[in-house]
Amino acid sequence: HLRAIDAINPMCVAFEEAREGGVTTAVTGPGSANVIGGQFIAIKTYGKRVDNMVLKDPVAMKIAFGENPKRVYESQQKSPVTRMATAAILRETLFSAKRYLEEVEEGKNDPEKKPDFDIKMEAMLPVMRKEIPLKAHAHRADDIFTALRIAKEFDLDITLDHCTEGHLIADELAKEGKYAIVGPSLSGKSKYELRNLTFETPKVLNEAGIKIAIMTDSSVIPLHYLSLCAGLAVKSGLDEEEAWKAITINPAQIAGIDDRVGSIEVGKDADIVIFKGNPLRDIDFETVMTIIDGKIVYKNK
């Protein structure tokens, strides 16, 4: 029931840096400390008041597998401290959400069957109705498969975030037809589940026919280095045109905001960035101008 909108500070320097780097839109939300973290949001990177920056809210419901929830709760001597417990807690909540949805629907015809208001279950209703996907933090191959397994059990939509070992299981992921949001790849192998971290992952997944997006996981990697991350993926074999798609139209489609952003088309928001040089090829490129909603929000002096 946590909502990203309540934690965003538009005055943070990260937004100014994003505009300087040519990033006009971001999808953001709770981290991966909890099995279910809360609702993600899509926003523009310019504005004084977050309410006026929103493109879509909510975009997804964050869930997390692997070491992060294990580590956080082990320090508190609470469950989950194993991967099995993480999966069990998620299933328990989804079973409750499924029953809550059934009662809500039954209550439309019979008020006596309407359930007592539960704000946590209310937050899960868009997930259960497949209006938004689960957004699964998963690095290791086995965690990715667990995320997919649970999504299938409850017939839910899901995106695979980080997908660090996706290149090892690309053939299997291609059968699933789910989106992979890859990154942050420009970081150290700070934990065991990152041992197979490589910039080749976008290339391998893309060649397997999987729609990919590249993310920085800001502030792990600041937003203004998004083009650098895409460029390093190109250096590792990703087709340059596909790399551009991975930071423009693909993430827009994955987030369900491609009717407004992600490409330059009649009827879409006037979000345009002009570069001097190629950000995916030239380390000394410059952002000449960033335009959001038709307004110049950054201009190189």
Image: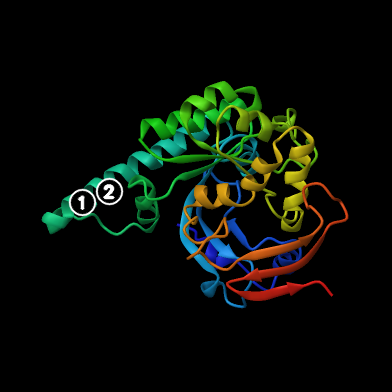
Q: Position of residue 12 (x, y in %)?
A: 70, 69
Residue beneath the point at 68% across and 32% down = 203
Considering only vertical position in the picture, is 195 above or below 130? above
Q: Quarter of the image holding residue 16? A: bottom right
Residue 220 seen in the current view: no
Residue 135: % across, % down: 51, 44
- Quote the CA–CA distance across marks 2 and 1: 6 Å
Determine which of the numbered discs, if any, sits on residue 105 in the image: 1
Residue 268 is at least partly visible in this image: yes
Question: Residue 49 location in percent, x, y?
Answer: 58, 77
Q: What is the residue that sits farthest to the left in this orientation?
A: 110
Q: Nearer the viewer, residue 129 or 106?
A: 129
> Going 78% across and 52% down the picture, which residue do you hit?
279
Q: Quadrant of the N terminus?
A: bottom left
- Answer whether labels 2 and 1 touch (C-beta < 8 Å): yes
Q: Is residue 234 left or right of residue 150?
A: right
**In the structure shown, which secondary structural element does the residue marked by tag 1 occupy?**
helix
Residue beneath the point at 40% across and 55% down:
123
Specify the amino acid type for callout 1: Glu
Q: Secondary structure at mark 2?
A: helix
Residue shown at 65%/27% (left/top)?
167
x, y percent for residue 301: 84, 75
